[in-house]
Image (cartoon, rainbow, N blue to C red):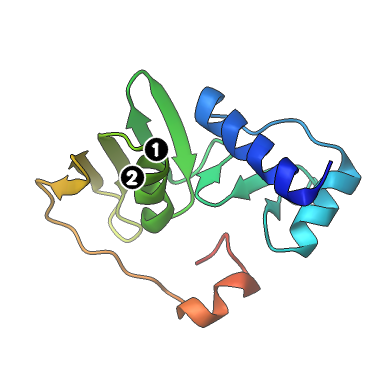
Amino acid sequence: MTTVELRRRIYRHFADTGVAPELTRPELEALESEHAVALSEAGTLAFANPFAAPPADFTVSAGTRDYAAVCAWDALGILAALGSDGRVQTSCPDCREPIALDVEVAQVRNVDAVVHFLVPAARWYEDLGFT
């Protein structure tokens, strides 16, 4: 299976189930070398942007399913990839106050929050889980 086919399989599995698929170590390593996925310390699939293996700091609810994301950008990206309305929930990393974003018809609604990226986009691949 090509890496493109593997990526499609991963995205379809995440979209259908909300969790990461099981892949072999060589498959994961090939995808990681192309920056297509990030692996956990245990060598399992941690995330394939915008989807993450739960648990993660952001929970995305779309229809009857929940998804995990590692940042606000990816959380909104999940809804865009699914073409779905939904809700993003997280908490402020400073004060732990809950934050919720509602997305309806591709528009963020009723939000009083600011997104802050700690690392410039050009350096995101140095540590995708941190950015």
Q: Residue at x 84, y 54 (%)?
A: 29
Residue placed furthest toward the top: 64
Nearer to the camera, 26 or 45: 26
Query: Label 2: how many residues lie within 10 Å, few (<14), some (14-19) or many (20+)?
Result: many
Q: Of marks 2 and 1, which one's residue comes earlier in the chain? A: 1
Q: Which mark is residue 59?
A: 1
Q: Is residue 70 left or right of residue 82?
A: right
Q: Residues within 10 Å of mark 1 (few under 14, many from 20)?
A: many
Would you name the residue on which mark 2 appears?
A: 90
Residue 121, labelled with which disc? Answer: none
| Circle 1: element type | strand
Alpha-carbon span between mark 2 and mark 1: 7 Å
Q: Nearer the viewer, mark 2 or mark 1?
A: 1
Q: Position of residue 93 (x, y in %)?
A: 36, 58
Q: Is residue 63 above or below residue 88?
A: above
Residue at horizontal 55 percent and vertical 35 percent from the top: 54
Where is 31 relative to 106, above or below?
A: below
Residue 60, percent across and down?
A: 37, 36
Q: Quadrant of the N terminus?
A: top right
Does the residue at mark 2 contact the one at mark 1 (Cβ under 8 Å)? Answer: yes
Q: Amino acid at mark 2?
A: Thr
Residue 5, horizontal then vertical, whole percent: 73, 42
Position in image of residue 127 (x %, y %): 62, 68
> How many numbered callouts?
2
Q: Disc 1 marks which amino acid?
A: Thr
At mark 2, the secondary structure is: strand
Q: Is residue 23 left or right of residue 86?
A: right
Question: Residue 96 vs residue 121: left or right?
Answer: left
Give me the residue at 25% from left, 34% from top: 85
Return the residue found at the far right: 26
Instruction: Give the residue displayed 31% in from the left and 34% down from the top.
Output: 84
